[in-house]
């Protein structure tokens, strides 16, 4: 079968390889890939800055945003041939730590977790892959190709789950406004889930995009193609930082209303020093009970929440997030950023 592989740590080592069938040790359910989403993590791996091959190997099968169709599954495991499915990315660490021991591998405390397509486990970027039934999630067939958005939506579902848990520290918490910074797939999915909660949603992007403006309009959200300073002191109850741009991260701190929550979802690279008035920031955060927290990855419950959010969403809206499809043989083109990209996918079905 064809597989998309890279040598982690070596830039531009990506290729399409003829690869052996997935081993039974990967899991009892055999899945045929339909499409695969790519994201910033894949770009980091291909550029040699991130990623780990499985033990004893030099190359890693990349890909963690899967969508496939079950080929074969053992009787009684909850899956049958033809089911539309997505694989869960992370596996608990072997110790396991207290978080992994209760199925919260997204909160792993010792960093020894593994991840399909990222850290020490082959990913889903091959014509066939295998998954353990406990790490496979069914996708509503009505979603079709938009089911590939389940993995990025699971990350957003966790951000919402934790934001709401923090908010409910006060019995009076009734958020009304949401500001999302960054209008990539994660930012737009965060806006979708905010709109589903009845919030007044604002999305801030670094440059004007007619498509993103239209997608925000369709949610009843307000699209701002300007800097945070131009929002004239707008202080949202919830702020989700999805851009991962260091200057934006600096600017969102301390920008919420009283009892506000800043949720950091976008990852930044180290090496960006900014002047921050720590005294003023601390004063605001203490006197107004503000919270800033970070969140990454997702556990099984978040994949299920994500599935519910996608099923409630307009199918046309979800399909518009997928702006480009590349064939397997030219998969590295999916990693090149083009001006109008939102989510780019690799097509395994069209060959
Ligand atoms: Zn752990």
Image (cartoon, rainbow, N blue to C red):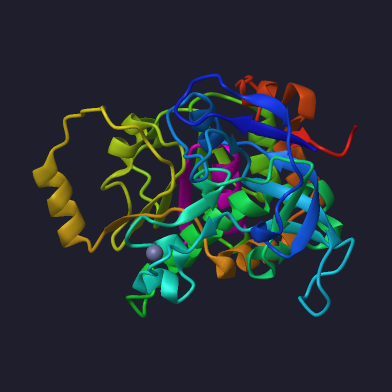
- Residue 175 point in image, percent of width and height: 44, 64
Q: Residue at x 80, y 70 (%)?
A: 79
Q: Is residue 175 visible?
A: no
Query: Within the image, what quadrant is residue 43 found in?
Result: top right
Q: Residue furthest front?
A: 56
Is residue 219 positioned above or below 59 on the image? below
Is residue 167 positioned above or below 335 on the image? below
As drawn, is 105 to the left or to the right of 23?
left
Query: Within the image, what quadrant is residue 279 found in?
Result: top left
Q: Residue at x 62, y 52 (%)?
A: 151
Is residue 177 positioned above or below 218 on the image? below
- Residue 117 point in image, percent of width and height: 58, 44
Q: Is residue 213 visible?
A: yes
Quarter of the image that includes the N terminus: top right
Q: Residue at x 20, y 29 (%)?
A: 274
Quarter of the image that includes the C terminus: top right
As drawn, is 265 to the left or to the right of 74?
left
Q: Residue furthest left?
A: 279
- Residue 73 point in image, percent of width and height: 82, 67
Query: Within the image, what quadrant is residue 172 found in?
Result: bottom left
As drawn, is 106 to the left or to the right of 315?
left
In the image, 294 versus 261, the foreground residue is: 294
Residue range in magenta is: 173-195
- Residue 287 point in image, percent of width and height: 16, 61
Whether the magenta-drawn stretch holds residue 190 is answered as yes
Ligand 1's quadrant is: bottom left
As drawn, is 24 to the left or to the right of 255?
right
Whether the magenta-drawn stretch holds residue 350 is answered as no
In the image, 75 versus 164, the foreground residue is: 75
Is residue 177 positioned above or below 53 on the image? below
């Amino acid at each position: 079968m064809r597989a998309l592989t890279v040598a982690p740590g070596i830039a531009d080592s990506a290729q399409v390889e003829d690869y052996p069938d997935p081993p039974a040790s990967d899991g009892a359910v055999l899945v045929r890939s339909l499409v695969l989403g790519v994201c910033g993590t894949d770009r980091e791996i291909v550029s040699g800055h991130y990623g780990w091959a499985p033990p004893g190997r030099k190359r890693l099968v990349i890909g963690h945003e899967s969508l496939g169709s079950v080929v074969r599954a053992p009787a009684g495991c909850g899956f049958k041939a033809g089911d539309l499915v997505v694989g869960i990315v992370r596996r608990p660490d072997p110790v396991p730590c207290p978080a992994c021991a209760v199925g919260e591998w997204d909160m792993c405390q010792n960093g020894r977790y593994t991840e399909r397509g990222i850290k020490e486990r082959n990913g889903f970027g091959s014509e066939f892959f295998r998954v353990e039934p406990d790490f496979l999630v069914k996708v509503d067939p009505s979603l079709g190709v938009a089911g590939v958005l389940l993995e990025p939506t699971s990350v957003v579902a966790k951000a919402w789950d934790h934001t709401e848990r923090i908010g409910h520290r006060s019995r009076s918490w009734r958020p009304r406004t949401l500001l999302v910074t960054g209008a990539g797939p994660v930012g737009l999915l965060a806006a979708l889930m905010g709109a589903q909660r009845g919030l007044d949603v604002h999305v801030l992007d670094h440059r004007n995009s007619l498509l993103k403006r239209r997608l925000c309009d369709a949610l009843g959200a307000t699209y701002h193609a300007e800097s945070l300073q131009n929002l004239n002191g707008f202080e949202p109850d919830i702020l989700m930082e999805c851009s991962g741009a260091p200057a934006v991260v600096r600017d969102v701190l301390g920008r919420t209303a009283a009892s506000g929550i800043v949720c950091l979802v976008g990852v930044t690279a180290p090496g960006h020093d900014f002047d921050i008035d720590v005294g003023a920031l601390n004063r605001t955060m203490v006197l107004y009970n503000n919270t800033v927290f970070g969140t990454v990855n997702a556990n099984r419950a978040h994949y299920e929440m994500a599935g519910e959010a996608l099923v409630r969403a307009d199918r046309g809206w979800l399909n518009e997030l997928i702006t480009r499809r590349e064939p397997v043989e030219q998969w590295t083109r999916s990693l090149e950023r083009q001006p109008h990209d939102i989510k780019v996918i690799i097509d395994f079905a069209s060959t």
